[in-house]
Image (tube, coloured by chain):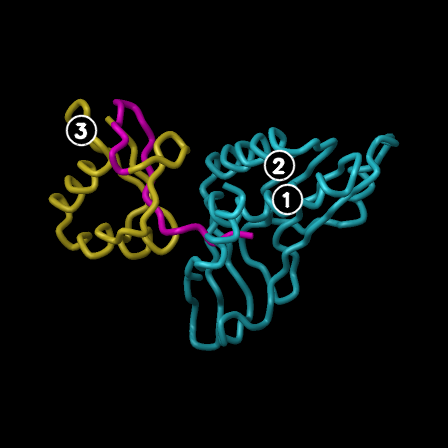
Chain colours: A cyan, B yellow
Amino acid sequence: MISIQQHDFDVGEEYTALIANDTAAGAVVTFVGRVRDLNLGRDVLGLHLEHYPGMTEKSLQAIVDEAQSRWKILRWKIIHRIGNLHLGDNIVFVGVSSAHREDAFHAAEFLMDYLKTRAPFWKKELTEAGSVWVKSQEKDVSAAQRWE
Amino acid sequence: MITILFFAQLREQLQCEKLNLELPADSSVALLREKLIELHPAWLKFLASDKLLFSVNQTLVKASHVIQDGDEVAFFPPVTGG
């Protein structure tokens, strides 16, 4: 399930939903991305997250479909927050369950790598000096390329 | 008639979120970009960036993609979510 939302999420609740009534899942991998205080030497006070409604969901579903064609995934969940976020706030959640750990580890990492390079979200950092649009990073592009 | 959307930094630079345009049949995204620059010469330095991404009907496409009447086209900077 894909959820694009302004409100926060609870990792415990998400984990519970991923494993509820499922004794086939021997492995669950969860990832949480958060607002960090320092980015490329800039002191960050908060973030504004913009997205392209409709395309966001469509592109994330395509990424999940691709992951499911590569690994045996039992359950999955992607949450991405939008709007104004503060230091330390959760931004993104990716959770994957599978029978064995290898599938869940790989799928979760793949989902994050593709989300960062293909899903239409944009971050604007709020700093003491004003707000700055975050530039895409080459390391994110190369992280996604290793799955090709 | 097609709908054109701009997002994030590009939206701010162009001071435009959305516009509608009639395009000749078989126009590509590249041609649409030229047409936009012709209509708004000040947009040249922002739309000329080779890093811009394009989508048609909410799927990423290349500049050579041919646009159909009724399509939703979007121009935006590289994505930075996650």
Secondary structure beneath label 1 = strand
Mark 3 neighbour class, 10 Å CA radius: few under 14, some 14 to 19, many 20 or more: some
Q: Position of residue A49 (x, y in %)?
A: 51, 54
Three-letter amino acid code at disc 3?
A: Leu
Three-letter amino acid code at disc 2?
A: Ile
Number of numbered callouts drawn = 3
Three-letter amino acid code at disc 1?
A: Ile
Relative to B45, A15 lies left or right: right
Q: In which chain is the residue bearing label 1? A: A
Residue found 60% across the figure and 35% down from its top: A67
Question: Mark number for residue B23?
Answer: 3
Please tell me if label 2 and label 3 are on a single chain: no
| Disc 3 from disc 1: Cα separation | 38 Å
Residue found 59% across the figure and 71% down from its top: A37
Relative to A2, B3 lies left or right: left
Q: In which chain is the residue bearing label 2? A: A
Q: Nearer the viewer, residue B7 or A101?
A: A101
Q: Which badge, 2 or 1, is on the more N-terminal residue?
A: 2
| Disc 2 from disc 1: Cα separation | 6 Å
Q: Main secondary structure of the magenta part?
A: loop
| Disc 2 from disc 3: Cα separation | 35 Å
Q: Quick check: is A14 in the magenta stretch? A: no
Relative to B15, A106 lies left or right: right
Q: In which chain is the residue bearing label 3? A: B
Q: Position of residue A108 (x, y in %)?
A: 66, 44
Question: Mark number for residue A2?
Answer: 2
Secondary structure beneath label 2 = strand
Vertical arrangement, residue B64 with respect to residue B45, above or below = above
- The residue beneath circle 1 is A79
Which stretch did the figure color magenta?
Answer: B63-82
